[in-house]
Amino acid sequence: MSTQREVDEAKIRQQIDKIVEGIRAKDLEGLKQLYAADVVSFDVEPPLQHVGVEGKLKNWVRAFTLFQDVRYEVRDLTVAVGGDVAFGHCFGRLSGTLKNGAATSGMWVRATFCFQKTDGNWLIAHDQVSVPFDMASGKGVTDLEP
């Protein structure tokens, strides 16, 4: 018999799978259902933070306008659950075919998701996406592989 923690972890992993599916389908409505209304997102794109689900979705709108076809993959996902809060971290890569027909392999980013259980549903209350940077140049390093 599964423990509640194991059940919750499986549900969170399903939520991550839905993020991947939503990105690949450019499904803004589907993605919207995965975030808390007051999500705070520290994404790779300015500004420093996006507050609220509409702010988070604006990032996806901008990304989707660049791509004809989108691929997204997640590697090395780790999830920790405790009561009504949980967190996960992984590597993610957005790639595909750009609107101009050029293929891009994208870049790997580091992602952290913080979940909160609300009315029985695990929603993303906070996420952070980043790339390492070279301290000498101050520039992001985007050619690393997990």
Image (cartoon, grey):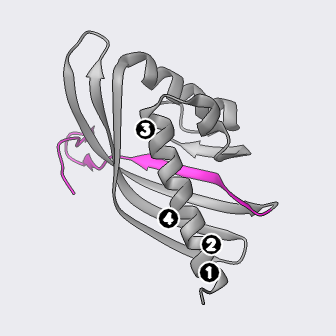
Pointer 3: what residue?
A: 44
- How crowded is the residue under tag 2: few (<14 C-alpha within 10 Å), some, or many (20+)? many
Dot in front, 2 or 4: 2
Identify the residue shown where x is 45% and y is 45%: 20
Residue 2: percent from the left, percent from the top? Answer: 59, 86
Q: Which amino acid type is shown beneath numbered disc 4?
A: Gly
Q: Secondary structure at mark 2?
A: helix
Identify the residue shown where x is 44% and y is 16%: 65
Distance CA(mark 1)–CA(mark 2): 5 Å
Dot in front, 3 or 2: 2
Quadrant hosting residue 136 = top left
Distance CA(mark 4)–CA(mark 3): 18 Å
Distance CA(mark 4)–CA(mark 1): 14 Å
Pointer 4: what residue?
A: 88
Q: Which amino acid type is shown beneath numbered disc 2?
A: Asp
Pointer 2: what residue?
A: 8
Residue 62: percent from the left, percent from the top? Answer: 48, 21
Magenta residues, as a range? 120-146
Q: Is residue 136 magenta?
A: yes
Identify the residue shown where x is 64% and y is 46%: 34
Residue 116: percent from the left, percent from the top? Answer: 70, 62
Q: Secondary structure at mark 4?
A: strand
Dot in front, 4 or 1: 1
Instruction: Check the picture and name the quadrant holding the C terminus.
Output: bottom left
- How crowded is the residue under tag 3: few (<14 C-alpha within 10 Å), some, or many (20+)? some
Of the numbered discs 3 and 2, the one sitting upstream in the chain is: 2
Determine contact: label 1, label 2, CB under 8 Å. yes
- How crowded is the residue under tag 1: few (<14 C-alpha within 10 Å), some, or many (20+)? some
Farthest top residue? 100
